[in-house]
Amino acid sequence: MDAEAAPKLSVVIPAYGSEQIIAELFNRLETVLTEDPEVNGSYEIIVVCDHSPDGTWSVIRSEAAKRPKVKGVLLRMNAGQHNALMAGFARARGRIIVTMDDDLQHAPADIPKLLAGIAAGHDVVFARFKNRNHAAWKVFGSKFNNLVAGYLMNKPSSLYLSPFRAMKADICADILTYSGPYVYVDGLILSVTRNIGTVDVDHYERHAGVSRYGLKKSISLWLKMATGFSLVPLRLTSLMGVAISCLGFVMAILLIIQKLTIDVMPIGWSSLIVTLLIIGGFQLLALGMLGEYLGRVLLTINSRPQYVIAESVGFPPATSGTGKA
C-alpha cells in the first residue's frame, strides 16, 4: 500500500487466553479511536494470537471479518509476549504504534494520553500505573525487574517499563533491525533512544478469566533482559571469583600462622566441607551463566526464528511467514 493509505495509529496487542475479553476490547478501542480528534478513525488494530490454547483465535478471526480495521495473526507455536509483539511490529503501518495487553487492565481510554506525550516531542511514552491490580508476587517482581534494569541497562530510575506504551514508527523500525530469537522490547527501546516520557494512568482488574502469565514466563523475560542486553552478570561472576580467591589466600595465611603458633590443629571437618560446597556451588553458578550466554549465541547463529506464522486475517498474503533470527 502507498504511504498515503497508511493509518495514523497502529495498536499492536499480543493475545493469549483472552477468548472472553477480546471482542469487548475491540468495542472499546473502536469507540475511543473513532472519537479521538487526533486519530479521527485513522487506525488499525493488529492482534497477534500467541498460539493460545482456547478459542481466542476463532474470536479474532470472526471479529476481523466484521471489523475492517481489525487484523489478526496466529503464531504456529507459543513464542512469548515480546516475540509476538515483533510479529505485530513487522506488519504495523501507523505513524505511531501503541502496544497494550489483551485483558483490559490497560484502558483504551488512556491511549490519547500516550499520544499526547508523543505529540509533545517524545520518541516513546510509557504508561506509569498509579495502582496495580496484580498478585503481590507480580508487583514485587515488576519492581525488582525495574530496579535491575536500571543497573543493567542504565535505565533512568524515574522510568517505569510498562507493556502499555506508544512509540514513533521510526523507533519501531529500529527495533525491527534486531534479528535475535530472544526479544526484550524495552531493552531494544532503551538501546535506540533515551527521549522517553511517561504518563500516569490507572490499572484495572482483568475483565474476565485468569491471567496465564506465570512465574516461569516472568523469569524467562528477566533472563532475556539480564543476558541479552548486558555483560554485567558475567562481570559480577568474575568479581565473585576474585573475591573468593582472595578469601582463600587470607584463610591460607591464617592457617599457616595458626600452625606455627599452636601445636595441635583443630580437626575442622565441618568448615572444610562448607568451604568446598560454597566454592563448588559458585563454580556451577559460573558455568551455568556461561552456558546461558553460549546457548543464546548458538541459537542466534543457527537463525532460530522469533516467531512462525500459521495464519493471518486482514493482511495481503505476502505478510505471512516467519520471523527469522
Image (tube, helix red, strand yellow):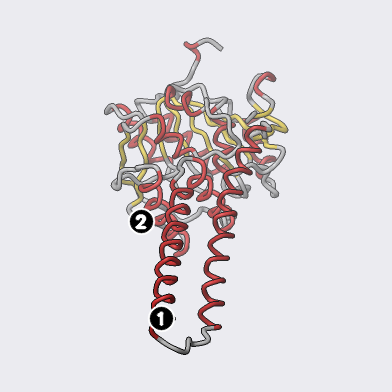
Q: Which mark is residue 269?
A: none
Q: Quadrant of the C terminus?
A: top right
Q: Position of residue 178 (x, y in %)?
A: 53, 29
Q: Which of the 4 image quadrants contains residue 193? A: top left
Circle 2 packing at 10 Å, graded few (<14), some (14-19), many (20+), is few
Image coordinates for residue 175, horizontal then vertical, percent: 48, 29
- Amino acid residing under circle 2: Asn
Q: Residue drawn at (27%, 28%), measured in percent from left and top? A: 120
Q: Secondary structure at mark 1?
A: helix
Q: Residue furthest left?
A: 120
Q: Residue at x 32, y 53 (%)?
A: 130
- Residue found 56% across the figure and 26% down from its top: 90
Percent x, y for residue 147?
A: 37, 53
Residue marked by disc 2: 131
- Near-viewer residue (227 or 145): 227
User: Observer-nearest residue: 284 or 244?
Assistant: 244
Mark 1 or mark 2: whose residue is earlier in sequence? 2
The one of 240 and 24 positioned closer to us in this rendering: 240
* Mark number, residue 260: 1
| Number of disc labels | 2
